[in-house]
Image (spheres, grey):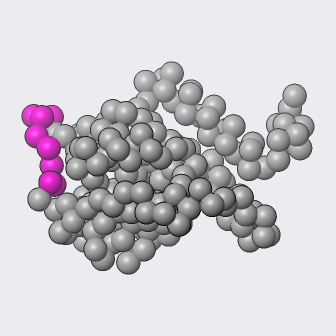
Amino acid sequence: MNHYMFSRWLGPTALAVVLVVIASATAQADGDVGIRAPARIARRTIADRSQTHHLGLSTRTDDEKRIEVNLSTQSLIAWQGERKVYEFPVTTGQEGQPTLIGDYEILDKEEDAYSDAWLLRLPLWMGIYQFGDYENGIHSLPIDNSGNLLWAEGLGVEPLSHGCVVLAPDDAETLFRWAEVGTTVQIHD
């Protein structure tokens, strides 16, 4: 079945998800840890989702999971429908490396990702948007090569990260287990 027939059979949104899964599986087979993703595919998935909502074809249900990040209060709230399920302090992107405001979704998950750019382990990684060649995401406090946890003093207080939304280890574990690929993430001031 060629790409065109596959697109007609699945529809554009489902095809984009299939392409992300294939790209992710290929990247993991090549030894990539999941923090790089093809920008074209990630943007396509988000664009298709926005177009669906624009056409009035929303698939939102009363128990839909979503994550809200408030940059002003350095907090994250996990919602299921209109019910607040969790609320956690976070630290987000520092000046010059901001966490981008917008509506996103969880693109991928990796239990123990590594950033070649920052030389940091990023436990409980959930990628949410492309930033250049890399994804920014939600994850536990990063760990440097000496085993030190970074930025704990910023949780709920001030932005200290390189653009990601960072949680305490126990909070990150809870959110990682609760959220699924495709969960909506809303970031605002």
Residue 40: in sight, yes or no? no
Residue interval drawn in magenta: 145-152
Q: Residue at x 47, y 46 (%)?
A: 179
Q: Residue furthest top?
A: 29
* Rendering coords of residue 64 (x, y %): 59, 56
Residue closest to the eye, 156 or 15:
156
Q: How many marks?
A: 0
Is 189 within the magenta? no
Residue 22: in sight, yes or no? yes
Q: Residue at x 43, y 63 (%)?
A: 84
Note whether 26 is above or below 129 in the view shown: above
Give the prevailing secondary structure in the magenta stretch: loop
**In the drawing, does residue 188 fall left or right of residue 88?**
right
Note whether 117 is above or below 1 in the view shown: below
* Rendering coords of residue 131 (x, y %): 44, 57
* Rendering coords of residue 68 (x, y %): 44, 65
Q: Residue at x 10, y 34 (%)?
A: 146
**In the drawing, does residue 148 fall left or right of residue 55?**
left
The image quadrant that residue 22 belongs to is top right
* Rendering coords of residue 16 (x, y %): 70, 45
The image quadrant that residue 170 belongs to is top left
Note whether 153 is above or below 20 in the view shown: below
Note whether 73 is above or below 23 in the view shown: below
- Tell me the quarter of the image containing the C terminus: bottom left
Q: Residue at x 53, y 66 (%)?
A: 82
